[in-house]
Image (cartoon, coloured by chain):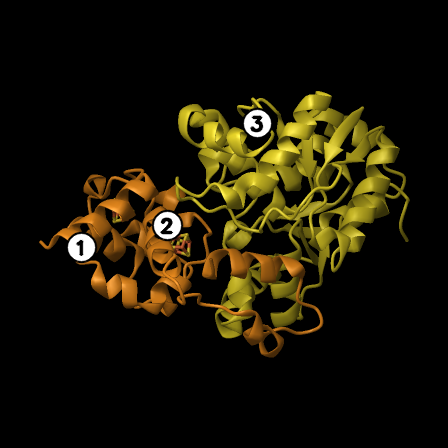
Amino acid sequence: MKVSYFPGCTLKTKAKDLDEQARACAEILGVTLEEISNWQCCGGAFTTASDEIATKLSSVRALMEANKKGQPLLTVCSACHNVIKQTNVAMKENPDNFAFRANMNLAPDNYNGEAEVIHYLELLRDKVGYDKIKEKVVKPLEGLKVACYYGCLLLRPSKVMAMDDAENPTIMEDLVKALGGEPVYYAYKNECCGGYIALEDAESAMKKSQKISNNAKAQGADVIITACPLCMYNLKKHTKDVPVIYFTELLAKALGIKE
Amino acid sequence: MEKSKENLIQDVVRRSGVNPRKCMKCGKCSGTCPAYDEMEYHPHQFVYMIETGDIEPLLKSKSIYKCLTCFACVDRCPRGVEPAKLIESIRLSVIREQGNNHLTPQMIPELIDEEMPQQALVTAFRKYTK
Ligand code: SF4
Ligand code: SF4
């Protein structure tokens, strides 16, 4: 299976391991990630205002390319996924306004949100299947207690993102189970780490990150997993009791790619 | 109400796509907001103050830079009001004015460290500047 892939700026720089692990694991699972040509940064956050056009065009361009190839558009970074999916749904839902103006800016083209946007976790659950992943596991996680941290970007706004139940998601927990680990259940898995406030108010990010980590620790977690480089940064910077790793690292370990 | 202020309120509401009148003032949005402690005006107050036309204090408040765009208030509002979109719309009214960027490239070296991901910078610029 081939899918179009939008890595995003951070997976080419600070989060290179996330990119490399995702590609390597996909190959083992029979999926090739074809990088979008000349992709541009998604901007990191979706601007909800209906009169914002230019800031959404890089996402639209990537969506158009995937659509022309007849492939789903895959992302690994939670922020890219959030921005691109929200943009795509806005294209679909506002054909006369947003989609029309975006199309006029690009080419002009005639794209109206037809492409399928999927996160890597959805690729694993819906296209590959957790049963198949289970068969490919060579080094099961042996009961490792994993706190799955979703944050906000993967899940919300839930009407648009539609990945899972936004208040009680299980897509990562089910993956952990397939890999032989033991998910721990804790209340803060879908609360915000502070995100970009880290830049100008580190203390605010610290308070939020510590609540998350302390809660995971109280429930007995050995490790916290995330799909977001900014969650990773905030949690690592402000907490130390529970290590934080990308979900792809656990996957790579279980599939025998990584020590 | 004077004309220019009325237009501004209309702009804010139209651009957000939100109908503030749907709010039943339950406060759930503010109760769930992770930035509550850092905000002078809270999400339900944004909704109410925009509904009643009292927007000057919001335009001047640092609260518009404290929202994390986590969409918790959007998801958990029982009336589907989507307060975060109003906060974003107010912030855009401010930063779209010339000279009103909340963040400039000159400020960056002081604010970053070795580990900070690019994502933090691009997102902050997207939210704080035009
Ligand atoms: S989107 Fe903003 S206002 Fe709404 S809950 Fe999150 S931080 Fe608070
Ligand atoms: S949660 Fe919704 S209905 Fe309740 S105060 Fe906030 S905006 Fe109003």
Tell me which chain the residue with mark 1 is part of: B
Marks 1, 2 in one chain: yes
Q: Report helix, strand or loop for mark 1.
A: helix
To the question of a shared chain for discs 2 and 3, the answer is no
Q: Residue B84 carries which label?
A: 2
For the point 60% across and 39% down, the residue is A59
Residue A91 in the image: x percent, y percent?
A: 49, 29
Marks 1/2: CA–CA distance: 21 Å
**Residue B5 numbered mark, or none:** 1
Q: In this rendering, would A173 be left or right of B35?
A: right
- Please name the amino acid that badge 2 sits on: Ala
Cβ atoms at labels 3 and 1 below 8 Å apart: no
Q: How many marks?
A: 3
Left or right, A199 with reference to A243: left
Residue type at tag 1: Lys
Contact check, label 1 and label 2, Cβ < 8 Å: no
Name the tint of chain A in the rendering. yellow
Q: Say what amino acid the circle numbered 3 marks.
A: Pro
Q: Where is residue B114 in the image (x, y as percent from the top left)?
A: 71, 72
Task: Residue A108: give its label.
Answer: 3
Q: How crowded is mark 1: few (under 14 residues within 10 Å), some or many (20 or more)?
A: some
- The verdict on a common chain for dots 3 and 1 is no
Chain shaded orange: B
Which numbered disc, 1 or 2, marks the residue that appears first in the sequence?
1
Residue B83 coordinates in the image, percent (x, y): 32, 48
